[in-house]
Structure formats: structure tokens, C-alpha cells
Image: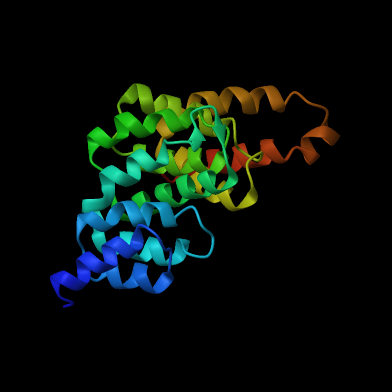
Amino acid sequence: MIGEEMFVSLLKLSERRMLNGLIETLAQYGRPETIPYFERALEDDFYRAAAEKAFQKLGKASCDTLVLSAVTLRPGPFVESPSSLERRRSAIRLLNGIGIAPQHWQTLRRLLDEPDEELVVGASKLGMSIASREDRRAISHRLIGLVALAPWHLQEDIEDILTALKDESAGEIAGEVAQRNKQPEDLRARDERLRALLRIQRRFETA
């Protein structure tokens, strides 16, 4: 293990420089003083992968920072830069790997109202097993609204969550399926959302 004096020197350097090698070296310590540096690195495409590995090493010790990062827009509460959004997406992905405590959900639940689908789906995955019944209904309703509309790489997660939340989602899905089945046959045949909802209903039968 690298000595304490070296650690202090590296930590001071981290205030001025962003380097992959520095991230990797500081990660070896597993100390909380390094967390702010890693969190800043999540905003940069070039350093994000190294920072994510550092957070994975820290594990549960990094949860509080990642939760706050996931809900913090930069440069301000009403304006967000593209790099800030990528940082928040990264924080949610990391939290899904590390896990959260129930109290963290009280902060993260606000992400259900985000316009960014990746944040919504990532937060829903975190909350589906620990959220209150009311929040599970909110998760279900929000995700039903994204079926066949969110980017394709999120659709499997959306369908998985809605299947797991069968008690909360089945009624709303059945209602929309009934309405869409009233369309003329040619429209039903082209209705991707209807097909996705029917696919979820079939999964309910074996859930």
C-alpha cells in the first residue's frame, strides 16, 4: 500500500489535475476523501470509466455521494449541461450495481419525474423492491407511459419491471389494451405499443 505522505500529495494533485492514472491510484486506498474527485470525473467521457471502477471498489461507502449526484443538476437547478446528465446516468448505473438503503429511495424517487428515460428506468429498478405501495404504483404508471416509446435499449428493463410490479401495473395495462383493441385491424397490426403491452400481459401469466 502506498504511504500516507504519498496519499496526501496525490490528493492535493487531484484538486488541480484529472488523470486516469491518478484515479486508479487513489482508488487503491479505498478512502472516502477521494470520493469528490471520482464524482467530478464522472462528468468527463475520458475519465468516467476509471471513476466508475473506483466507485465500485468503494462500494456502499460511496452511496450517499452517488445518490446526491444522481439528483443534482449542474451548473444549476434549472439548467443542465450534457456532461451533468451523463454523470447522473452513471451514478444511477453505479447505484444499481452497489445497491441502496431504503432512506436513499426518499431522495431518488424524484427521478420518476425526470424527462430523461434512462434516469427514470434506472431509478425505477432501484425502487421497485423497497418503495412504498404508493410509490410502486407511481413507478408502474410512469413506465407504462414509456412502453414502446423509450429508446430500445431500455425496453427490456421496462417490461421486466412492469412484470415484477404486476399487482400495480396489470389493471392499467388491461385498460389500455382494451382501448387499443378497438382500433381497426390494420391499425392494430401496426401498433407497436399494443404489441408490447400484450407481451407484458403474456408474461403476467407465468410471473
Where is residue 9 shown, x and y percent of the image?
25, 68
Give me the residue at 24% from left, 71% from top: 28
48 vs 169: above or below: below
* Residue 73 appears in view: yes
Q: Residue placed at 41% from the left, 35% from the top?
A: 165
Tell me residue 49's x, y (percent): 45, 65
Give the answer, above or below, for where 155 lies relative to 167.
below
Which residue is rendered at x = 50% and y = 48% of the image? Answer: 157
Q: Nearer the viewer, residue 146 or 37?
A: 37
Q: Quadrant of residue 168?
A: top left
Quadrant where the N terminus sits is bottom left
Residue most toward the right?
Answer: 186
Q: Nearer the viewer, residue 58 or 158?
A: 58
Q: Position of residue 131 (x, y in %)?
A: 31, 31
Q: Residue at x 40, y 49 (%)?
A: 91
Looking at the rendered structure, the number of numbered marks drawn on it comes to 0
Residue 128 visible in the displayed image? no
Q: Is 176 above or below relative to 69?
A: above
